[in-house]
Amino acid sequence: MEELKLRVKELENELIKCRQNQNQSAQNMPVYRPKIGQMSAEVSDSNPYSRLMALKRMGVVKDYERIRSFSVAVVGVGGVGSVTAEMLTRCGVGKLLLFDYDRVELANMNRLFFQPHQAGLSKVEAAQHTLRSINPDVTFETHNHNITTLDNFNHFMERISHGGVEEGAPVDLVLSCVDNFEARIAINTACNELGQVWMESGVSENAVSGHIQLIIPGETACFACAPPLVVASNLDERTLKKDGVCAASLPTTMGVVAGLLVQNVLKYLLRFGTVSHYLGYNAMQDFFPSMSMKPNPHCDHAHCRRQQEEHQRREAERPREEEVVVVEEEVVHEENHWGIEVVSEVTEEELNASSRPLPDLPEGITVAYTLPPQDSAEGLTVQETEESLEELMARMQQI
Amino acid sequence: MEELKLRVKELENELIKCRQNQNQSAQNMPVYRPKIGQMSAEVSDSNPYSRLMALKRMGVVKDYERIRSFSVAVVGVGGVGSVTAEMLTRCGVGKLLLFDYDRVELANMNRLFFQPHQAGLSKVEAAQHTLRSINPDVTFETHNHNITTLDNFNHFMERISHGGVEEGAPVDLVLSCVDNFEARIAINTACNELGQVWMESGVSENAVSGHIQLIIPGETACFACAPPLVVASNLDERTLKKDGVCAASLPTTMGVVAGLLVQNVLKYLLRFGTVSHYLGYNAMQDFFPSMSMKPNPHCDHAHCRRQQEEHQRREAERPREEEVVVVEEEVVHEENHWGIEVVSEVTEEELNASSRPLPDLPEGITVAYTLPPQDSAEGLTVQETEESLEELMARMQQI
């Protein structure tokens, strides 16, 4: 009897201690703020939208609330993609679709967003958890898979076509924040087929340059129209080309590229300022080259050529308004056949040695791949193989 | 007896449930990674420094490890300052000193870094908690006070002079991430007196432009040498000048400015690339004006003039090496007297109406304040008052 009474006392004390601990833990847990039905411009400390709605009073944006009507797909939730998703979440975008198949690692901690306690979690799940606690008004949809496999690619196409704010409508924009050529080609293929506007982003392997690019199928050059453009960093590239070297990265360069990307997204969706077609960032010199590029009529992508025809038909049918003057440079090469070398940048010797005419590029922008000279034994020359970029790429993956 | 037995059973069950909950909570709590004694270039998923140390192999930075020998003071831990502190933390800087007197509010959630569950906490405490869990190798020192009051200013001076990685040595750099003129003048005063190199940053009230500026006392223009330079946003400024309007802000612009600032910090501390003296960001046009400005020999600040003399003496004594060609534009006005109007930008009419000669500025950069025409009844004309910028500012605060 006494023993039992003692045991009850003991247990009660244990339970009190446990509950105290639990309360303390709860205080350190993220407290989700309640959802907000309508964006308000009210100037108060507790209104997370006051500084955004102020863009209207400042004469920058006409109707900021429209941000809630847009759905954006972010492919790749790494150094650029995670910050991109966070910026869009804080801006109060309607819906975000996140695609990635990677896990968070401590080796990612030199970039913004992920934290050491998330190591081991899938990037899309960890990102969703953080983003939802930052802004519960955004709808999130996550896909923990690699979009380049056949099944996943079809699923990706399906979600782009139907993942709008109102299920069934297409998304408004696709953002490529991936770190490899294969995934970019997959996004390009899907967007060409669907006529889906997208923006591409990239950061160099030496971490000191990057770029963003707007691709409107049929209207601006697609990713297969020309060799991918990158920003020259004016560094000795020989170091870069060594095999098995781990790429460098910096939170600064990736933060700047994500910022320029999402700024371009806001300008495109909310219709203010000038939307950039191609904007580069050379961190060594703080130089920001920009340009515009028309699609290549001989593009390898049949869907790109179809989109070009449709665009031209639409343009011809459109009632002529004022002429909009845009500096555009057409790609000047007869055929779109490129021998591919996997290097992040091209040296001057290689540019000179290349046998093919290259696009006329502004200072500071160069191509990521060149065609080796005709007599070169190295590289794959397309005259012999007649393979497409994707087939070449697939072969290269096997090498 | 039976009752007591039942009670024991009941309590045991409660305790098990409570402990299960506690375990679950523990799993969601930040797990601090252990400290790392020496930065390693080893390519492994668990090495948070692998992608930074790769900058050496890439030929960008000679000795990245030196980052640990630097102490940086960040004044203002808001939209720009918090991201600045996070980038430096992830880069593995030796020590960070954070100064701010503000609390986190839900109204800050449209910018990166702070989260809703931190609302109500002091910014420096909340920032330190997050940053320490991101990188426990960094030493943090926080000051929850306003540096512009007399006592706090003296304490600020003391910490800049002695808050190095080795206590007693000065910090290596001061970063101004504040949002008001008064705090900038305080930082300028302290750094002129101490000969402390600092960088200034700013974002416009309409959220679509910003800038960074490097100030080496005696060598480049200080904050009192000329009216502060801002980036023209080519928007109608009339909206901006209305009284009592809450400033707009965007995570994009602030992220880009923080990224450009910390990139400049890395280039300055680790000696790579070209360190920018003044770099602007016009988000409407994606335009990035840059310039350099020599100090004004007639600067109001006695300590600035002293630093100029000391710099000239050092230059004269220095053995002549190669001539370094830097595009520098001297401020061309006889006296440094400015009537101050609190506006974020200056219209063309105001520039034309200004009676004083203005610095010859490159396209896209303009002054934040102009001197009204001599016959103007508005504004404070210095000829009558002979007040310094600080005195004028103090008077304006009272108006």
Image (cartoon, coloured by chain):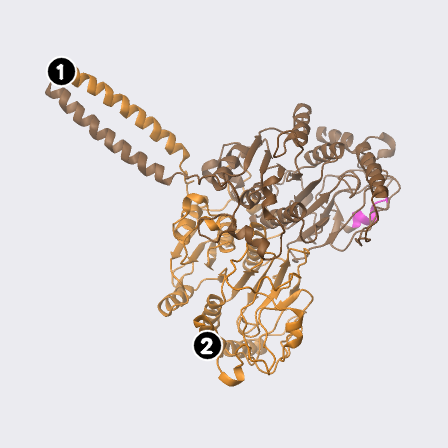
Chain colours: A brown, B orange
What segment carries the magenta color?
Answer: A349-356
Quadrant in the picture for the N terminus of chain A: top left
Q: Is residue B330 left or right of residue A45?
A: right
Within-10-Å neighbours for mark 1: few <14, some 14–19, many 20+: few
Q: Main secondary structure of the magenta part?
A: helix
Residue A325 locus on image (x, y percent): 80, 54
Q: Is residue A235 left or right of residue B313?
A: right
Quadrant in the picture for the C terminus of chain A: top right
How far is the residue under mark 1 from the one under mark 2? 83 Å
Residue B316 forms part of the magenta stretch? no
**In the structure shown, which secondary structural element does the residue marked by tag 2 occupy?**
helix
Residue B91 locus on image (x, y percent): 52, 49
Q: Nearer the viewer, residue B77 or B320?
A: B77
Residue under circle 1? Answer: B1
Residue B158 locus on image (x, y percent): 38, 66
Q: Is residue B124 left or right of residue B56?
A: left
Residue B376 locus on image (x, y percent): 58, 80
Say whether residue B274 is visible.
no
Type of residue at label 2?
A: Glu
Type of residue at label 1?
A: Met
Residue under circle 2? Answer: B391
Within-10-Å neighbours for mark 2: few <14, some 14–19, many 20+: few
Residue extending furthest toward the bottom: B384
**In the structure shown, which secondary structural element does the residue marked by tag 1 occupy?**
loop
